[in-house]
Image: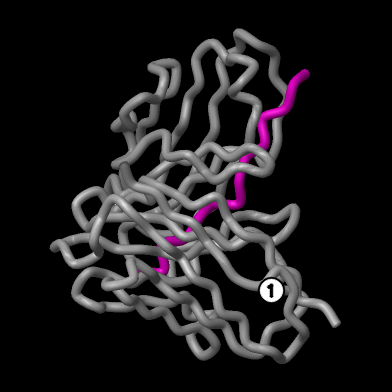
Amino acid sequence: QITLKESGPTLVKPTQTLTLTCTFSGFSLTTFGEGVAWIRQPPGKTLEWLSIIYWNDEQRYSPSLETRVTITKDTSKKQVVLTMTNMDPVDTGTYFCAYTTVRTMTLENWGQGTLVTASS
Amino acid sequence: EIQMTQSPSSMSASAGDRVTISCRASQSIATYLNWYQKTPGKAPKLLIYSASILQGGVPSRFSGSGSGTDFTLIITGLQPEDFATYYCQQSFSSPFSFGGGTKVEIK
C-alpha cells in the first residue's frame, strides 16, 4: 500500500525559505519509472503543479517557480524534500506530494496535504 | 508550456443528472489527459487517465473521451457523493499543468 505524508511549518514569514518533507511508504523511489511530484492549491484557486523528481534523480520544475524551488530525495529515509525560497503571501496554500510513474503519467496516490501560510 | 482550459467553471445539477465537463489543451496532447475529483479538505482523487481509462475502484458512471486538444468527462446519473470540483491535467509534457476546475454544485 502506497502512502505519502507531507510535513513542515504551517506559518512562514515573507522572504523566508519554506522546507517541506514528503515521507512515503509502499515504494522505494529507486525503481525504474517511479517519481514524486509536488502540487499546491491556494485557497479558492486551482491546483498548480510545482515540481517532480524521478528514480534516476531527474528533476523538472514549473517555469514560473524554477528560480525559487528545489526538489531532492533521500531514498534511505524515504523522503522527498521541496524547498521554496523568498516566500510571499501569494504562496499561501495547501501543498501536496503525490506518487507517479512514467508508465501511467498520472498522480495515482496523494498525501493528505499540508496548509502553509506565508504571513508576517 | 501547455495551457488547460475547463468549461464550465461551475454548474448546478441534481442527483440523477447527466453532467458533461469539457477540457481543452492549448496544443495537441494525444490522450495524455487525466481527470481528478476534489472535495474540500481532501486530496484529489484520480478518476480517469489516458483520457478514457477508468482508474480501479472508480464507479462506471464516470467516463472520459477525447484526443488531441478536446476532452470530455461525463458523469451519468449524478450521485450525492459526486458533488465536488473536477480537474483535468495534461501529462504530455512538463510542466504537467491542470485546468481551472469545474465545481459541480447541488441545484
Total marks shown come to: 1
Which of B72/B98 is in front? B98
In the rendered image, which quarter is residue A33 located in?
bottom left
- Does residue A78 appear left or right of residue A104 in this picture? right
The residue labelled by disc 1 is A91
Which span of residues is magenta-colored?
B94-107
Circle 1: is it few (<14), some (14-19), or many (20+) Cα within 10 Å?
some
Residue B60, percent across and down?
38, 17
Disc 1 chain ID: A
Name the image quarter holding the N terminus of chain A.
top left
Residue A82, percent across and down?
48, 76
For the point 36% across and 76% down, which residue is it? A60
- Does residue A34 appear left or right of residue B100 in this picture? left
Task: Find numbered disc 1 in the image and state the secondary structure of the residue it sits on.
Answer: helix
At label 1, which amino acid type do we have?
A: Asp
Asked whether residue B105 is drawn in magenta, I would say: yes
For the point 33% across and 54% down, which residue is it? A25
For the point 29% across and 42% down, which residue is it? B50
Name the image quarter holding the C terminus of chain A.
bottom right
Which of A117/B49 is in front? A117
Residue A63, percent across and down?
48, 80
Instruction: Classify B72 as above or below A88.
Output: above
SS majority, magenta: loop
Which of A6/A87 is in front? A6
